[in-house]
């Protein structure tokens, strides 16, 4: 759904109940229906949306992981006949290891699963207690007869048949905060829209740093950047989440949510403008011709 080069993109923080995938999925489905009615093309949710980010050692419990997978497939089925891309967070088990993943969904199919590369394990974060880095992972995961095999890998680009100019890639929270984010490689291979599923907590001054980080990355990579983060309902005695969602384009923040109020923000990204900027800046040696013919 692109008109004159523009696509409508929401970033969503649903109301979450930690370790209650069925409840969370109901909230996710409400947002999918709402944003589709509003003409959205790409909908991005926060990190580990289906389970909640702050499950702690419940991530080690099989019943939670089984229910997350069941609810994920429910979301996939609910996207049938909807002309939008939905990116939702889910814990995924692969060969007895647990991965923090972004699941890319469209029209009743799972297009791909992108695992988180950089797992924070400092200060208030302890993701290595539960999760494994997706760096170097390349796996075809079986989802049954109805959905078939799904590719799991960090380096995936998602191309739209109806909008060939649009190339989407994913990274997850901490991936943006490291010196060499995965989005840099994604952009070099043609991605012009990066989506980030995050659970970035609130400490004094962090909101302004987060905003500048998202803005700067969209400027350096001449891309759109959709950043959706965890919000109220996920706070614990250790961390507080504010749902500080951001949508940026080539250095400009187009939309920013009010903190501590879960919900959805929208912006219109100008894909043609991004392509024009990449052509104009001759020092920008991105190579869309190298992009794989994926989804």
Image (spheres, rainbow, N blue to C red):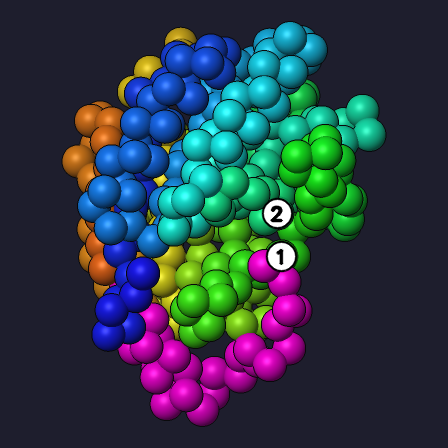
| Circle 1 residue | 156
- Nearest to the observer: residue 117 or residue 75: 75
Q: Within the magenta stretch, is there residue 235? A: no
Magenta range: 269-295
The answer to whether any part of residue 94 appears in the image is: yes
Q: Which mark is residue 112?
A: 2
Q: Earlier in the sequence, mark 1 or mark 2?
A: 2
| Whole-percent x, y for residue 282 in the image | 45, 91
- The image shows residue 36, relative to residue 253, as above or below, that is above
The one nearer the camera, 14 or 201, is 14
Q: Residue furthest left?
A: 258
Between 21 and 237, the one lying in front of the other is 21
One can see residue 270 in this view: no
**Residue 126 sits in which quadrant?**
top right
Q: Which mark is residue 191?
A: none
Left or right side of 50 for 40: left
Quarter of the image where the N terminus is located: bottom left
| Residue neighbourhood size for the residue with mark 2, other residues' Cα within 10 Å, grouped as few (<14), some (14–19), many (≥20) | many
Give me the residue at 33% from left, 71% from top: 271
**Disc 1 secondary structure class:** loop
Secondary structure of the residue carrying tag 2 is: strand
């Amino acid at each position: 759904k692109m008109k004159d080069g523009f696509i409508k993109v929401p970033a969503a923080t649903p109301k979450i109940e930690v370790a209650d995938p069925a409840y969370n999925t109901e909230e996710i489905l409400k947002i999918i229906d709402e944003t589709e009615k509003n003409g959205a093309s790409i909908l991005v949710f926060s990190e580990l949306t289906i389970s909640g980010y702050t499950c702690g050692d419940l991530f080690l419990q099989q019943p939670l992981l089984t229910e997350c997978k069941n609810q994920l497939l429910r979301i996939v089925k609910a996207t049938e006949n909807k002309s939008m891309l939905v990116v939702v967070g889910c814990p995924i088990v692969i060969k007895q290891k647990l991965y923090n993943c972004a699941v890319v969904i469209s029209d009743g199919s799972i297009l791909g699963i992108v695992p988180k590369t950089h797992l924070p394990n400092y200060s208030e974060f302890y993701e290595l207690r539960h999760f494994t880095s997706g760096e170097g992972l390349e796996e075809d995961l079986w989802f049954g007869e109805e959905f078939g095999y799904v590719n799991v890998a960090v380096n995936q680009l998602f191309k739209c048949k109806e909008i060939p100019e649009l190339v989407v890639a994913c990274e997850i929270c901490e991936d943006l905060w490291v010196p060499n984010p995965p989005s840099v490689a994604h952009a070099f291979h043609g991605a012009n829209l990066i989506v980030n599923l995050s659970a970035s907590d609130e400490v004094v001054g962090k909101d302004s740093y987060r905003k500048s980080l998202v803005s700067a990355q969209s400027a350096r990579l001449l891309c759109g950047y959709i950043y959706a983060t965890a919000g109220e309902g996920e706070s614990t005695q250790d961390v507080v989440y504010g749902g500080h969602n951001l949508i940026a384009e080539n250095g400009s923040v187009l939309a920013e949510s009010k903190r501590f109020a879960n919900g959805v923000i929208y912006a219109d990204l100008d894909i043609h403008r991004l392509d024009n900027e990449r052509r104009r800046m001759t020092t920008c040696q991105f190579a869309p011709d190298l992009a794989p013919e994926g989804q």
